[in-house]
Image (cartoon, helix red, strand yellow):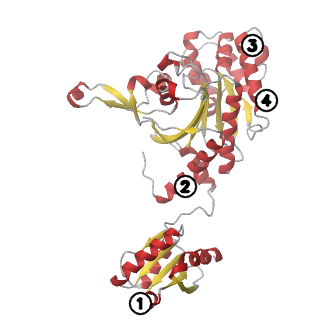
Amino acid sequence: MRDFLPDDVRRREHVIAIVRTVYERYGFEPLETPAVENLETLTGKYGDEGNQLIFKILKRGEHEASGQADLALRYDLTVPLARVVAHHHAKLPRLFKRYQIQPVWRADRPARGRFREFYQCDVDSLGSTSPVVEAEVCAAVSDVLMELGFRDFVMRLNHRQLLTAILETAGVEEARHGDALVALDKLDKIGRDGVAKELTERGVAGSETLLDLFTSRNGIAEFLAAHPAGQAALENLRQILALVEGTSAGSRMRLDPSLARGLSYYTGAIMEVNVPDLAGSLGGGGRYDNLVGMFSGQSIPACGFSLGLERIIVVMTERGMFPADLPMNPADVMVASFDQAGMTHAMALAAALRRSSLRVFVYPEPDKIGKQLKYAESRGIPCVAMLGENEIARREVTLKHLASRAQETHPQDRAGDAVKELLARG
């Protein structure tokens, strides 16, 4: 859990603004949920490993001594969405598309791109089983990454029913399916030998057959020839791949049978986006048709994708991907004053400059002008507006452009335009 200084916040807001703009371009609507959920809302939705990472909140007041928890910090944005849809179903449209950009918390071990408090940028579509939903979600995520400047990402695609069919055909007993998927999901992180060892430790039979299929990625259709559900899953994946052809995701998507996604609520297609220089993913998602029904008893199909803001920022920072003209200073112009009597005039000038849509910093003390200029330069403020006795008497202002050292005097009633012209000249 970290502090974010001004430059950090500006980079984060730059990314969030692009995410929000793209998601709204696709017709997704904003949603926010509380940081705290009932513990029972979250438990049992993320698998055994996920349950261990939930930050639990102990009972309070007279129940404090019990040492029991009844609340928890939000683990992701998907389960709270399912709760919201179940609770407010009558107020929401049948086809509900929402985006949500908020922090989540996990009691995880911090590492590069992995934190205990981090932001997720989720986009979800509820109410339809059509593969158009998956295709559109993937296209929206691809557009976000393209607009942020990513060009080397890959979107991996698989299907939970395809995985189940492979496990069944390979002879893995149903009780070991969850263990097998948790291990297989680490194939890109610990390699074939590491996964083979973990499968053995978890008591999963047929590990060599599974690893041959997942690493070679060939012969799966033939392997599942006698498995109707597996064939249906393959057809669903073919439809999604065909639908994304005309979008920015078309050239990015790859069918990857080894993709498992550890969360237990996925029921259909699953997706993950990766870049070469980051262990793990920038984000992932999938179809979860049964999750809302856990809260409402009514089946509502759903599919979504979650981008990890922190991981995106880590990669963009290391690669130098942020725009050179991203404002990293507190103001466009600083108003300086020579004495206490001039402060009233300085405040009035600052108000006029702000009405011209300029960012204005008022130096609060009547200090030596050299010291004020030095401060503005140290903060990267490009222009200083100076009000001495002569300027105040003549209702003028002297503007100084620090980079070029250009200095000129203008009437105060056109100070805003004059500052903009000076900044435009560079």
Residue of label 1: 389
Kindly identify the amino acid type of the residue bearing the numbered disc 2. Arg
Q: Position of residue 85 (x, y in %)?
A: 51, 27
Residue 242 is labelled as 4
Residue at 46% across / 25% down in the picture?
Answer: 87
Q: Earlier in the sequence, mark 1 or mark 4?
A: 4
Label located before the other in sequence (4 or 2): 2
Q: Nearer the viewer, mark 1 or mark 4?
A: 1
Closer to the chain start, of discs 3 and 2, is: 2
Q: SS class of the residue under badge 3?
A: loop
Amino acid type at circle 1 is Glu
- Across and down, in percent, residue 328 comes to 53, 63
Q: CA distance from mark 4 to mark 2?
A: 35 Å
Return the residue at label 2. Answer: 11
> Dot 1: what SS?
helix
The tag on residue 224 is 3
Q: Quadrant of the N terminus?
A: top left
Single out the mark in the foreground, 3 or 1. 1
Q: CA distance from mark 2 to mark 1?
A: 41 Å
Around disc 2, counting alpha carbons within 10 Å, would you say few (fewer than 14), some (14 to 19), or many (20 or more)? some
Q: Tag 3: Cα neighbours inside 10 Å, few (<14), some, or many (≥20)?
A: some
**Residue 248, visible in the rendered structure:** yes
Q: Nearer the viewer, residue 129 or 108?
A: 129
| Three-letter residue code for mark 4 | Ala
SS at badge 4:
helix
Give the residue drawn at x 54%, y 17%: 202
Q: Which circle, 4 or 2, is nearer the viewer?
A: 4
Establish if 173 lies above or below 150. Answer: above
- Quote the CA–CA distance across marks 3 and 2: 47 Å
